């Protein structure tokens, strides 16, 4: 690769024009106003020679960013770092070039962010997979994927994509951002906190190894961001791949699955991207769901963290004391099966007959 080729592509007038149009189209998502975007471009045009020189000298750094804490649906918080308008412009320009390089390498089962059709395409693909007879589904959610990604892993994947040192330094600076108010040491080594399409591309780049393994093994799946849905014909296949995926994520990326959102399902599916999938009149369809998420509403195999395991055990024991003799006999087999699974510290299955457990 010719020296500075990547930098030339990122800072080219054509690429900057494309970035400007994209920022105008998704102005609500970037937290930038139209006026701020115009001002950033005007400032870039005035200082582009200086910026280019600093990037080539590997001395360019973004200004301290603004830390924003976003409340997630499950009640936890996600930290994103919002760059200044000018730095955001450079970040989006770098993301534009990286996307063009990465897109041909991605699996056809991977869907990227699209403000108009992205989520809809994923949902339709899920319905088609279910209708194809693969009704055992492993829904795998990665625990805080962007926040837990080690930057050394990200940079290793980038170096495999291109070798230009100046460009690698630029991308490292764009994902290594600090708070303008206070420095947080956890931002030093781990996590991609910048709020931009670059964050999603970095996740796609790192997860592409797992995607290739799934494609090579002819596993039917869809992925949107860090949310997987894998489709199988038997529960044994689903359990087997649950273990394989957990091992691959841990060994290759240092990531783990979210214990609250990972499940193997058969009769009802989801929540996934704001919808549930159900079988009605011999046809799979989508249903709206409540915004709040609860671990106990998930049907299927669950990984339980120790605290949840303890709560469920206590709940079963209390139910045994307050139920009458007839009800206790009816539930004895169910309780025994679930407690056995808990004692083995393994995943366990909740069938339709066991739905009453969730309401106790």
Image: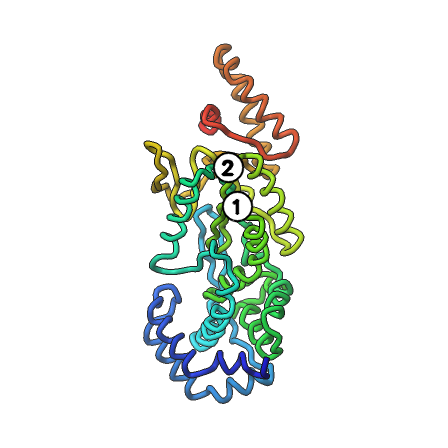
Crowding at dot 1, Cα within 10 Å, few <14 / some 14-19 / many 20+, comes out as many
| For residue 222, side relative to residue 253 (left or right) | left
Residue 179, position as x, y percentages in the image: 53, 68
Q: What element carries label 2?
A: loop
Which one is earlier in the sequence, the residue at label 2 or at label 1? 1
Give 353 or 304, whichever is nearer the viewer: 353
| For residue 208, side relative to residue 127 (left or right) | right
Distance, label 2 to label 1, CA atoms, is 17 Å
Above or below residue 209? Residue 53 is: below
Pointer 1 residue: 140
Q: Residue at x 57, y 38 (%)?
A: 237
Tell me the tag on residue 346.
none
Q: Which of marks 2 and 1 is in front?
A: 2
Give 360 or 197, whichever is nearer the viewer: 197
Q: Which residue is drawn at 64% across and 54% down?
A: 254
Above or below residue 178? Residue 4 is: below
**Circle count:** 2
Crowding at dot 2, Cα within 10 Å, few <14 / some 14-19 / many 20+, comes out as some
Residue 292, position as x, y percentages in the image: 41, 43
| Quarter occupied by residue 312 | top right
Tell me the tag on residue 233.
2
Give 308 or 104, whichever is nearer the viewer: 104
Residue 337, position as x, y percentages in the image: 58, 24
Q: Which colour scheme is used?
A: rainbow
Give 268 or 38, whichever is nearer the viewer: 268
| Quarter occupied by residue 113 | bottom left
Q: Residue at x 61, y 29 (%)?
A: 341
Residue 72, position as x, y percentages in the image: 45, 51
Q: Residue at x 51, y 53 (%)?
A: 226
Above or below residue 185? Residue 144 is: above
Q: What element carries label 1?
A: strand
Q: Residue furthest top?
A: 325
């Amino acid at each position: 690769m010719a020296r500075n080729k990547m930098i030339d592509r990122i800072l080219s007038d054509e690429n900057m024009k494309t970035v400007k149009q994209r920022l105008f189209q998704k102005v609500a998502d970037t937290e930038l106003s139209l006026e701020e975007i115009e001002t950033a471009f005007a400032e870039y045009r005035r200082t582009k020679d200086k910026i280019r020189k600093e990037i080539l000298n590997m001395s360019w750094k973004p200004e301290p960013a603004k830390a924003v804490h976003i409340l997630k649906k499950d009640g936890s918080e996600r930290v994103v770092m919002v760059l200044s308008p000018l730095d955001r412009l450079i970040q989006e320009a770098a993301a534009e070039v990286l996307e063009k390089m990465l897109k041909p390498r991605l699996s056809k089962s991977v869907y990227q962010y699209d403000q108009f059709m992205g989520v809809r395409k994923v949902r339709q693909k899920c319905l088609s997979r279910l209708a194809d007879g693969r009704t055992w589904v492993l829904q795998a959610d990665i625990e805080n994927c962007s926040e837990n990604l080690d930057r050394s892993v990200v940079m290793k994947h980038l170096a495999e994509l291109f070798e230009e040192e100046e460009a690698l330094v630029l991308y490292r600076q764009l994902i290594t951002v600090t708070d303008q108010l206070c420095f947080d040491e956890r931002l030093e080594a781990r996590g991609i906190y910048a709020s931009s399409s670059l964050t999603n591309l970095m996740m796609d780049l790192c997860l592409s190894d797992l995607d290739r393994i799934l494609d090579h093994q002819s596993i039917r799946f869809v992925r949107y961001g860090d949310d997987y849905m894998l489709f199988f014909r038997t529960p044994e296949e689903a359990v087997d791949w649950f273990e394989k995926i957990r091992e691959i994520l841990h060994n290759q990326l240092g990531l783990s699955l979210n214990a609250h959102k990972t499940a193997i399902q058969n009769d009802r599916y989801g929540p996934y991207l704001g919808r549930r999938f159900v079988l009605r009149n011999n046809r799979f369809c989508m249903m709206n769901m409540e915004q709040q998420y609860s671990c106990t509403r998930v049907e299927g195999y669950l990984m339980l963290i120790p605290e949840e395991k303890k709560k469920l055990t206590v709940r079963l024991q209390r139910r045994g004391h307050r139920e009458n003799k007839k009800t206790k006999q009816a539930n004895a087999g169910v309780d025994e099966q679930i407690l056995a699974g808990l004692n083995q510290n393994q995943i366990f299955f909740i069938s339709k007959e066991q739905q009453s457990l969730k309401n106790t």
